[in-house]
Amino acid sequence: KYYAKPTEIKKEVSNAPLTKEEKQRIAVIFIMAFFSVFFWAIFEQKGAALNLIADEHVDRVINFFGKPFEIPTAWFQSVNPLFIMLFAPVFSKLWVFLGKKGKDLSIPAKFMVAFWLIALGYVILLTATSVCGDNKMGIFWIIGAYFMFTMGELCLSPVGLSMVTKLSPVKFISLFMGIWFLANSAAGWLAGKYSGKLGSMSLQDFFTWPVVTAVGASLLLLVLIKPIKKWMHGVK
């Protein structure tokens, strides 16, 4: 009779007010979710405007056993999942290896790398438009861009999901995981709005703005990286 019942202890913990440390960690979740909106808005052009570009501006005819074969546009949507299956284990082992060496990147640093990689993907497409001119670009240009997109995704997506579970107070994990995916939803809306500009912009301009946005976001993260790491209170 001198000890609280387990159910009473659980109730007491769940109703405890948030500490200053927990509030700062929650702030980090919102900050990183904000940045993720811009990454996913750029990334999701892959399934919208870039799919139209692949249909109209990519030479999809290849020589298949001596006969011409036109690759269906929809097949390019399998490139990203294929790269994920091939390289997700590599990134997983890379983070573990760097962690053991004491050289693992912080979460905001990994987000920065993700922005650099997706910007590089659009630089590849910009280069293709300059090199090919009025001619259609080869399939390896867009496959190369998708490769960079996937490398960026692997630096941000699993890292972001892990971050939310680590930074969230236990009683609010499901809530903040929902907020994280709500940011993805906002990114999808923004991606659709930008895709709608394809018909009124040149390909050069259409590829340039994602580069500017990604680089700008990475520079802003660079400025904020120290306070973000401080508010994470040791979470890696």
Image (cartoon, grey):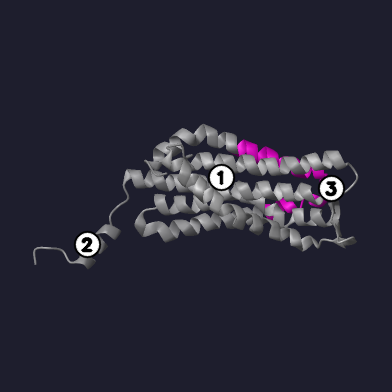
| Position of 117 relative to 187 (above/below) | above
Indicate yes or no whether the magenta region holds residue 29: no
Task: Report the residue marked by disc 2.
Answer: 9
Identity, as a three-letter code, of the amino acid under mark 2: Ile
In the rendered structure, the answer to whether residue 24 lies left or right of residue 181 reads left
- Is residue 193 shown in magenta? yes
Q: Pointer 1: residues within 10 angstroms few (<14), some, or many (20+)? A: many
Q: Residue at x 90, y 46 (%)?
A: 135
Q: Is residue 11 found left or right of 152 in the rendered image? A: left
- Which residue is at 61% across, 55% downward? 86
* SS at mark 1 in the image: helix
Q: Quadrant of the C terminus?
A: top left
In the rendered image, residue 70, in percent from the top left (x then y), is placed at 85, 61
Range drawn in magenta: 191-217
> Of callouts 1 and 3, which one flags the residue occurring earlier in the amino acid sequence?
1
Nearer to me, 114 or 179: 114
Q: Are marks 2 and 1 in contact (CB under 8 Å)?
A: no
**Disc 1 versus disc 3: nearer the observer:** 3
Taking the image as shown, residue 147 lies to the left or right of residue 167, namely right
Whole-percent x, y for residue 8 in the image: 21, 65
Residue at the location (53% across, 58% down)? 181
Could you tell me the amino acid type at mark 3? Met
Q: Is residue 42 visible?
A: no
Q: Which label was assigned to residue 35?
A: 1
Number of the front mark, 2 or 3: 3
Q: Disc 2 versus disc 3: distance between alpha carbons? A: 64 Å
Mark 2 or mark 3: whose residue is earlier in sequence: 2
Left or right: 184 as drawn, with respect to 2: right
Classify 10 Å Cα crowding around label 2: few (below 14), some (14-19), many (20 and above).
few
Which residue has dot 3 on it?
Answer: 137
Q: Element under label 2?
A: helix
Q: In the rendered image, which quarter contains the N terminus?
A: bottom left
